[in-house]
Image: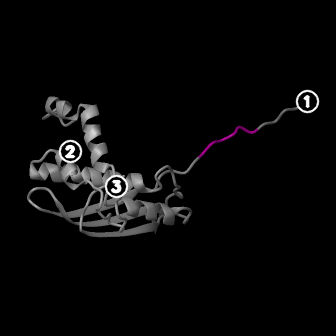
């Protein structure tokens, strides 16, 4: 008996690379007044799932924050890269990472604790998101933020690591 078997090769697509630019207007106390967000995703050589990935990314681009004036512009571009696919989050991880890094930079520019900046701007029941969704009584962004700060030892770690770039 001759057994001839080709080796199996497992391969998968990767997340869409994204370039995200934030310009933000704020009050002196850190309240978000305006957000201008530009999202460009690399779709690769074929469309595949780029439209839905871009859509989900744009929906989440303003983060879990209340802001009255928001403009989000998004494009998925054909490039000579391999096609990209959709993973858990479908584009939201890219834009959420961008808004959270941006919030850290805003806090630094204002000389404010990043958790405090997030607390000031977190969505609350009755707020409306950038996409027009009205937050109900079950809106938990503020509660989750406060609990995460408490359970993680954030304030203690922030003091201990101050000046260490951690």
Between discs 1 and 3, the one toward the N terminus? 1
> What is the x, y in percent for residue 91?
44, 56
**Which mark's residue is nearer the viewer, 1 or 3?**
3
Q: Nearer the viewer, residue 72 or 45?
A: 72
Find numbered disc 1 in the image and state the secondary structure of the residue it sits on.
Answer: loop
Q: Looking at the rendering, which quadrant does residue 92 occupy? A: bottom left
Give the residue number, with chain letter if any, for mark 3: 137
Find numbered disc 2 in the image and state the secondary structure of the residue it sits on.
Answer: helix
Between discs 2 and 3, the one toward the N terminus? 2
Q: Quadrant of the C terminus?
A: top left
Residue under the image location 26 percent in, 62 percent down = 22
Image: magenta residue range:
6-11
> What is the x, y in percent for residue 131?
36, 67
Q: Nearer the viewer, residue 140 or 92?
A: 140
Give the residue number, with chain letter if any, for mark 1: 1
Give the residue number, with chain letter if any, for mark 2: 115
Vertical placement of residue 142 versus 44, above or below = above
């Amino acid at each position: 008996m001759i057994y001839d078997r080709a080796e199996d090769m497992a391969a998968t697509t990767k997340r869409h690379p994204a370039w995200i630019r934030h310009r933000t207007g704020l009050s002196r106390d850190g309240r978000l007044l305006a957000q201008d967000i530009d999202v460009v995703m690399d779709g690769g050589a074929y469309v595949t799932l780029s439209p839905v990935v871009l859509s989900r990314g744009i929906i989440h681009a303003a983060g879990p924050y209340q802001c009255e004036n928001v403009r989000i512009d998004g494009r998925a571009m054909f490039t000579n890269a391999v096609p990209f696919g959709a993973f858990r989050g479908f584009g939201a991880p890219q834009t959420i990472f961008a808004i959270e890094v941006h919030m850290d930079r805003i806090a630094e520019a204002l000389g404010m604790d990043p958790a405090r900046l997030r607390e000031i701007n977190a969505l609350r029941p009755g707020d409306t998101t950038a996409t027009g969704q009205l937050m109900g009584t079950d809106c938990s962004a503020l509660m989750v933020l406060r609990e995460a700060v408490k359970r993680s030892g954030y304030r203690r770690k922030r003091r201990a690591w101050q000046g260490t770039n951690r």
